[in-house]
Image (cartoon, helix red, strand yellow):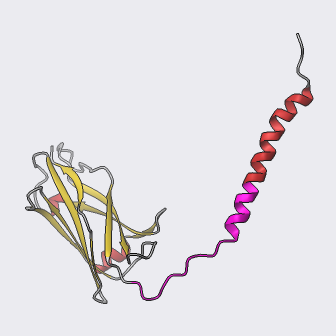
């Protein structure tokens, strides 16, 4: 039986470690040479995108009542989301476009909902169905849309409402 020498074992460990170090240094050096994207001064939102987290049942009646959302304002085609001063309106409609609930969000609430996430400038809110109607609803495929009205007159909306399931 042939024994592996300590030198051979060290090489097995040393080569991957050195390779990883070289790759990591190369990545850091490359990232340091990039210049940040210049943000134009005249951006005005013209597009809203929405994402939801799993709906919550805060009153424990087996019917979801709270819609946690994150949304982004964009000046399409600028590649990064932005913050802007203004008011929002969210509408939840059924598949036949009947209004189930609507929420108006003031500029001050919108301002306090600002966050920065992996995508960029975002807003995080919760929409409570019970603010507009009961949460005791049959299972319904609903569509959530958003409208932004900026203090400077800018108007933005969701190009396609977001499908979510409400009720139980």
Occupied quadrant, residue 127: bottom left
Which image quadrant is residue 129 in? bottom left
| Left or right relative to 161: residue 93 | left
Residue 65, image x and y in percent?
A: 20, 53
Foreground pick, 131 / 50: 50
Q: Residue furthest toward the top? A: 1
Percent across and percent down for residue 74 are 38, 74
On screen, residue 61 above or below 69: above
Outermost residue, front side: 77
Which span of residues is magenta-colored? 24-43
- In the rendered image, residue 136, in percent from the top left (x then y), is placed at 11, 49
**Which image quadrant for residue 104?**
bottom left
Judging depth in this view, the residue of 90 and 107 nearest the camera is 90
Vertical placement of residue 167 versus 6, above or below: below
Q: Quadrant of the C terminus?
A: top left
Q: Magenta stretch: residue 33 in it?
A: yes
Is 70 a magenta residue? no
Q: Is residue 69 left or right of residue 21?
A: left
Could you tell me which quadrant the N terminus lies in?
A: top right
Position above or below: 148 against 123: below
From the viewer's perspective, is 51 left or right of 26? left
Q: Residue at x 24, y 69 (%)?
A: 146
Closest to the observer, 32 or 107: 32
Q: Residue at x 55, y 81 (%)?
A: 38
Image spot of residue 3 (x, y percent): 89, 17
Along the line of sight, the residue nearer the viewer: 26 or 106: 26
Q: Say which residue appears at 35% left-offset and 79% top-offset.
A: 45
User: Residue at horizontal 92%, vertical 30%?
Assistant: 7
């Amino acid at each position: 039986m042939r024994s592996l020498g300590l030198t051979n074992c060290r090489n097995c460990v040393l080569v991957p470690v050195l390779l990883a170090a070289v790759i990591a240094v190369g990545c850091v050096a490359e990232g340091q040479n990039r210049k940040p994207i210049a943000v134009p001064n005249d951006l005005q939102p013209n597009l809203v995108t929405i994402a939801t987290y799993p709906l919550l049942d805060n009153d424990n009646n087996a019917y979801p009542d709270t819609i946690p959302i994150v949304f982004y304002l964009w000046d399409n085609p600028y590649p990064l989301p932005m913050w802007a001063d203004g008011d929002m309106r969210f509408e939840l409609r059924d598949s036949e476009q009947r209004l189930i609930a609507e929420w108006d969000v003031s500029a001050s609430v919108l301002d306090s909902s600002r966050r920065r996430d992996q995508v960029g400038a975002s807003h995080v809110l919760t929409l409570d169905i019970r603010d507009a109607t009961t949460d005791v609803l049959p299972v319904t495929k609903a569509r959530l849309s958003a409208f932004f009205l900026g203090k400077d007159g800018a108007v933005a909306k969701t190009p396609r409402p977001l499908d979510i399931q409400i009720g139980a």
